[in-house]
Image (tube, rainbow, N blue to C red):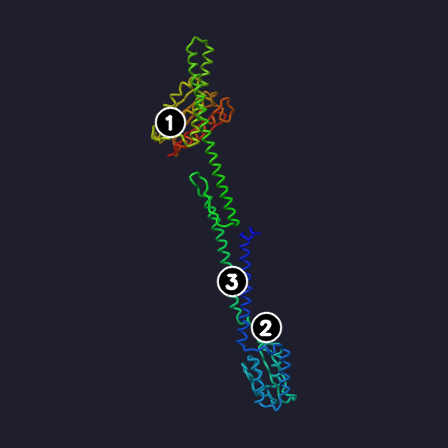
Amino acid sequence: MKKFFRSLLAKYMLIILMAILLIFLIQIVYATIGTVLVRITENTNDQELTDYDAIEEKWQEDANHLQNISRVQIHQHFIKWKQQYPKASMFWVDESGFLAEQVGVQEDLPSEWSSTFTAKFIKKRYGGDPFTVITFIGKNEMNGFIVLEIPRSTFQPPLQKIYSHYGDILLIVVVLTIFLFITISFLFFRGIRKRLLQLQEAMMLRDVDSLPLQIDVKKNDEIGQLEETFNQMVCELRESKQREREEEKLRRELIANLSHDLRTPLTKMSAQTYSIAKGNITQETKQAINILETSILDIDRLIENLMSYTLLMASKYKIERKEIDVVRYVRECLASWYPAFEKQEFEIEVELYPLENNKWLVDPVWLGRIIDNLLQNVIRHARSGQYIKVKTESADRYEAFVIIDRGKGMKNASNEKGAGIGLSIVDMMVKGMELEWDIESSKHGTIIKIKKYK
């Protein structure tokens, strides 16, 4: 229950309940004050008659008790009723049909009343507004008749009179109350929106580890619980990041130690192979030694790729970019690979023509490593095509050097392994030097382009 009262739902329900109670309170206060004002302005008393039948009966009774009919007596009778009903109007038509006396009459009445006009007057006033009572004076019809007219609004209940007199004020007060409720609701939801935007902003901000920042929890409602959950998530991410760093550090140390440990026996194997090759051996033994030396070189290259890949992933591989003649540099790298391709009986084509701009801002070591990995990949996986072509290419948007082979394509299964790490290193180094590269591979061969956009 305590948790519910702290919730946003409970707070908004409280706002609605307060608005409803405020409207009822305004109506009660308004009715109380209005009743007092009505009584003061109309100067009424608690003994007055407000029933139509009772007033008609009283008026007829008073008229029957009138004797010695005269204008003075009729006037006094009218004044007596005027005191009780200030809004009433009364007049007397004598036995001759003349208007003899009137009190409080606002309309113009004829001075002479015919039977026809009298009948029309009675018909017009019957059941209408004002409330009209017509009665003969005394017990003799020859004394004429007197008429009492009271506006029907006089007989309205006090509350209805209040609405009649001060309804506009009540409407304004209710409208202001509704406006106050809308304003409070707006402020309530604006506060919710502000807190949600702060939470969204905290999710977008990042620290040095690219993790979101924690936020201060000020309230224990639904949004506050969401903020606490967000903070817990941030803590878990930090712990995960820390574990990842420790694991990465352990992995780099393991790879470094493993590479060092593997290179020691490889060096010994290479030395022993060289010693054996110097001796008097058969042709078959020489072929076996050549295969063994090739395998040792492949293993050494794989170890070097593994070390490079680890350093690149950890952003520890140093890059030093400078302007070099890329055509000349590629030609030099290719020249060092000629013996390897000739040994595998590759057909070699070179079309390294000058580019529009031979100067590229690159790291020579990284670029050499890219070329070595790509050429090594051709020897290992496109040996069946026995063809390689290296050329330059100029287009409207870019310049590039291209490596083409006629192997079975990268999707084809190969007996050699390790190309995945080599190409991953190429991808990271190319992007690290702000270059681009494309690969088009099919069963008829592979085309690789290293591009520099103009």
Residue 225 visible at all: yes
- Percent x, y for residue 391? 39, 26
Q: Which of marks 2 and 3 is nearer the N terminus?
A: 2
Q: Residue 23 carries which label?
A: none
Image: 78 above or below 330 = below
- Percent x, y for residue 13? 55, 56
Image: 438 above or below 148 = above
Disc 1 and disc 3 in contact, CB within 8 angstroms: no
Label 1 secondary element: helix
- Residue closer to the observer: 295 or 244: 244
Q: Which mark is residue 365?
A: 1
Label 2 secondary element: loop
Q: Which of marks 1 and 3 is nearer the N terminus?
A: 3
Instruction: Single out the residue that lies furthest toward the top.
Output: 280
Q: What is the CA distance from the residue labelled 2 to the residue labelled 1?
A: 103 Å
Give the residue drawn at x 60%, y 80%. Answer: 132
Is 53 left or right of 260, judged from the image as shown? right
> In this figure, which residue is indicated by the disc labeled 2?
157
Disc 2 and disc 1 in contact, CB within 8 angstroms: no
- Percent x, y for residue 334? 39, 23
- Image quarter of the C terminus: top left
Q: Earlier in the sequence, mark 2 or mark 1?
A: 2
Q: What is the CA distance from the residue labelled 1 to the residue labelled 3?
A: 78 Å
Q: Nearer the viewer, mark 1 or mark 3?
A: 3
Image: 132 above or below 411 = below
Image: 192 above or below 443 = below
Disc 2 and disc 3 in contact, CB within 8 angstroms: no
What is the three-letter code of the residue carrying label 2? Pro
Q: Residue 177 carries which label?
A: 3
Residue neighbourhood size for the residue with mark 2, other residues' Cα within 10 Å, grouped as few (<14), some (14–19), many (≥20): few
When asked about the image quadrant of residue 353, the answer is top left
- Residue closer to the observer: 377 or 292: 292
